[in-house]
Amino acid sequence: MTDPVALTFAETDLADLATRPGRIALVIEPEGKMTAPVRRVNKLTRGAISRLTEAESWADRKSGEVITLAWPQGLAAEALDVMILPKKPEAALARCTGAKLGKLLGKAGMLVLAGNLKAPEDLALGLSLRAYDYDAQKTTKADPKGAVTMMCAAPLPEAGAVDALAQGVFFTRDLVNAPANVLTTPAFADQLVELHALGLEIEVLEEPALRELGMGALLAVGEASVTPSKVVVMQWKGGAKGAAPLALVGKGVVFDTGGISLKPVGGMEDMTMDMGGAGTVAGVMKTLALRQAKANVVGLVGLVENMPAGNAYRPGDVLTTMKGDTVEVISTDAEGRLVLADVMWYAQDRFKPAGMIDLATLTGAAIIALGHEMTAVYANEDDFCGQFLKAAGTEGEGAWRMPLAQGYDDQLKSRIADMKNLGGRPAGSVTAAQFLKRFVKDETPWIHLDIAGTASIKAGTDLAPAGATGWGVLALNRLVADAFERGED
């Protein structure tokens, strides 16, 4: 796994600033007011900071900007990075500013003089998340990033809390970035089994068990692959004994050719990320275990590969789900909902969850509707949905609630089965959610997250380089902390 940068928080000590190697970063308020660390650096650099803040151009500077002074006079550091931030920045601003430092971080490391900045852990998290670099498949590795020391006023934040979040996000990114010949269904399951060392209870359900459970839809999707289909169950029991858990369900299609309904050649290489929902669930479970969350959460992922072959399922086939409902296959490229349907039903049957959230790179229609800025959110209960949207907003992860209605559900009517797996082109993301809703019990609060546009972005984001983003780990961790840990000892 890609490891986050080594990060420590320390009380401000200005004794060795002049001889400090690597980079030095400092915070200065938009008004140019200098704290003690800034005044010290200003003195060592013979007024470089004063000249910067007194220049006419300073008035045009914006909060969140980082100005780099290379090889500053009076310092051994190779660069001085000046961050413009108010004393109490919003979390998103602090993280995005920290991310700019993460892009600059080199092998010599960095000293960050955060001064009296409120919540310096947000600055640190942004730095850590943007310092990510996936090079697992390269023979020539990038130079390792040096350690980061954040000097700030007491009380010092917990570096472990930042590390737990970064490790969860990095785990998700590594899984989503991995090519399909590396991240096969057995390899994926093996990585999840290793989470047992963190205190998670792990079970791997193999194909015979899945047949016995009646998961006809999931098994059909993976039938033509030489790699076996699996369901992995991860339990974190940090809450009250016997309390109903939150269930997180992830689509784990390690590669999606479209099956018999073969996808076009252009862009098919991107379908290594079609297990993004399962990757996010895995990252959340790792974070919860690392920070010893006081909540009961179960993560379930359906791991399959959708391939064409002589024994592949076909358009026109009728499948029987674990619930017992039958599905007419219109397109074998609408496979993710078939996987989720069986795993969601199993999650409810076995765990009787207090709430259930499924995540999937489910439809291109979600990208058409919302682009790469927002995840499409569907829910059957306002309060539960509101809790999630608040958590996503707090963490700066874009999410937008979409509609559910009978008219969309009617598009799934089948002449020969209980339903079709595809409702046509109109409102494709909505009809996919309506399909999943048929596998949600009346008593279960449920949210569906279509992360097709947010799980992996070729242009990158403020907090992530090009490729996998790890979207959802922060928001779901926040939801657990705010809505499921409350009241626990």
Image (cartoon, rainbow, N blue to C red):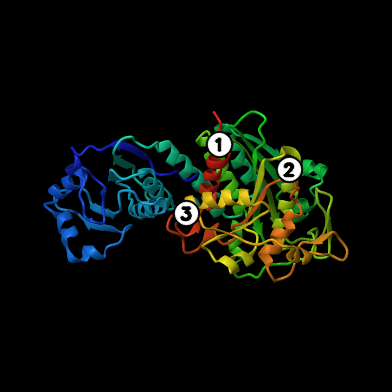
Amino acid of disc 1:
Glu
Q: Nearer the viewer, residue 44 or 64?
A: 64
| Image-quadrant location for residue 12 | top left
Q: Is residue 310 above or below residue 286?
A: below
Q: Amino acid at mark 2?
A: Gln
Kindly state the secondary structure of the residue where label 3 is placed: loop
| Residue under numbered circle 1 | 485
Where disc 2 sits, the SS reads helix
Q: Which residue is mark 2?
A: 348
Neighbour class for label 3 at 10 Å: few (<14), some, many (≥20)? Answer: some
Q: Is residue 151 left or right of residue 247?
A: left
Can you name the residue that lies furthest to the front here? 383
Residue under circle 3? Answer: 396
Residue 152 percent location from the top left of the image: 29, 40
Q: Is residue 328 visible?
A: no
In the rendered structure, the answer to whether residue 81 lies left or right of residue 92 reads: left
- Answer yes or no: do the residues labelled 2 and 3 have beta carbons within 8 Å? no
In this view of the protein, which residue sits in the foreground, 84 or 321? 84
Closest to the camera, between mark 2 and mark 1, is: 1
Q: CA distance from mark 1 to mark 3?
A: 21 Å
